[in-house]
Image: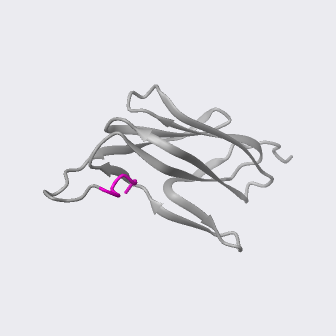
Amino acid sequence: MQPSRILPDLQCSLICEEVRQEVNGNFFLVGVINFIRVPQLPVTAMKLCFFNRWTAGIGQFVESVRLIAPDQTTVMRKSEVKFALEDAALHATNVTVFGQVKFDMPGAYFIEVLVDDVMKLRYPLSVGLVQLPPGANPEGMGQPQ
């Protein structure tokens, strides 16, 4: 008897500045973000891309990606996307883009990745202040590093 539905595993979740896809289907992840360090807050990230790859599932699913503020209750952004896996040996890649994300305070923000309301991963994105050397120009430093 073949199973008709198996909840998939989250193979990876990465935050980056850009995700591009080649003609052959391969992905380029540009500027994988470990943390955001800026000379002053608030700061607005023009674009945050969330690269999620699912595998080992069968059926139709809904992926949810949430960006949570440091208070750990405020949902700053949320996105949902439907996807399907017809065979457990296949995989599905979803890219979520949050534009114009404003970070008002330093601290640990959290990314939550769920499938059909089941939490698969929760990880921090640290936003902090960095001291510039005396005489340094802060222009152009508002982008996530």
Q: Is residue 40 left or right of residue 66?
A: left
Q: Is residue 134 left or right of residue 86?
A: left
In the foreground, 115 or 138:
138
- Who's the residue at 24% across and 58% down the image? 137
- Where does the image place residue 29, in percent across and percent down from the top left? 53, 64
Above or below residue 69? Residue 47 is below
How many numbered circles are shown? 0
- Where does the image place residue 121, in percent across and percent down from the top left? 52, 42
Q: Is residue 77 left or right of residue 23?
A: left
The span picked out in magenta is 139-145
Q: Main secondary structure of the magenta part?
A: loop
- Who's the residue at 73% across and 59% down the image? 90
Q: Determine the residue located farthest toward the bottom in the rendered image.
A: 24
- Where does the image place residue 94, in percent across and percent down from the top left? 65, 52
Above or below residue 104? Residue 129 is below
- Who's the residue at 39% across and 54% down the image? 143
In the foreground, 130 or 12:
130
- Where does the image place residue 101, in percent across and percent down from the top left? 48, 42
